[in-house]
Image (cartoon, rainbow, N blue to C red):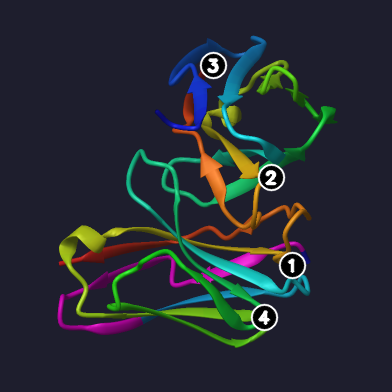
Amino acid sequence: KNEVEQSPQNLTAQEGEFITINCSYSVGISALHWLQQHPGGGIVSLFMLSSGKKKHGRLIATINIQEKHSSLHITASHPRDSAVYICAAENSGGSNYKLTFGKGTLLTVNP
Amino acid sequence: DTEVTQTPKHLVMGMTNKKSLKCEQHMGHRAMYWYKQKAKKPPELMFVYSYEKLSINESVPSRFSPECPNSSLLNLHLHALQPEDSALYLCASSQVLRAKVYNEQFFGPGTRLTVL
């Protein structure tokens, strides 16, 4: 069982819809990362958070440490948001170099 | 400058070739990483350099040889690769590599490697 689970695996939305991607983890973490990867492309770091909520433009990330759960929300989705969104946990035990990645959520936003 | 650059973007090589991948950052980061990513899979950590010294080798075959000639540059030398080594190779950097201090990793665009 992967220590970081994402849902859904695939998500199709219409332009303008509100999107939620969920991430659950079973390890103790020092931080949780949300990453974006366009098809065939490199990875962009969207958020790194250890508590509460962060907002950047139309993107919002929240984390509940007690429940070991994080969500990424996209408001007013747009076709250019189509990408794979990856949740990655930074373990709190020992060295923090290793990110444990979820399998990713493929988001397709149709015009 | 918050960018990690990688060259080349695409590389096709035969199993007997020797080639190198390059990664560069000018953010003053002292930790640099190599990841390998197969299609539709999350990245897998290969190597971590901290202050130009190899800190982590995730049991990577010796046909992959990393090098960190200075704090801004990271190379991955490739020799006698196999077709199954075809993947996207991602470089990343972060401020430091230190326990109990979390570090945002900045990723490069990757090099798409095809081994024939």
The three-letter amino acid code for the residue at tag 3 is Pro
Q: What element carries label 1?
A: loop
Where residue B55 sits in the image (x, y, percent)?
Answer: 56, 74
Would you name the residue on which mark 3 appears?
A111
Q: Tell me where the magenta segment starts and ends, as one range.
A: B2-19
Residue at 58% over, 23% down = A24
List the residue tagged with mark 2: A92
Disc 2 marks a residue whose amino acid type is Ser
Q: Residue furthest front?
A: A94
The kind of residue tagged 1 is Val
> Which residue is located at x 69 percent, y 45 percent?
A92
Mark pair 2, 1: CA separation:
16 Å
Q: How crowded is mark 1: few (under 14 residues within 10 Å), some or many (20 or more)?
A: many
Q: Tell me the element at label 3.
A: loop
* Residue, disc 1: B96
Chain of the residue that carries numbered disc 2 in the rendered image:
A
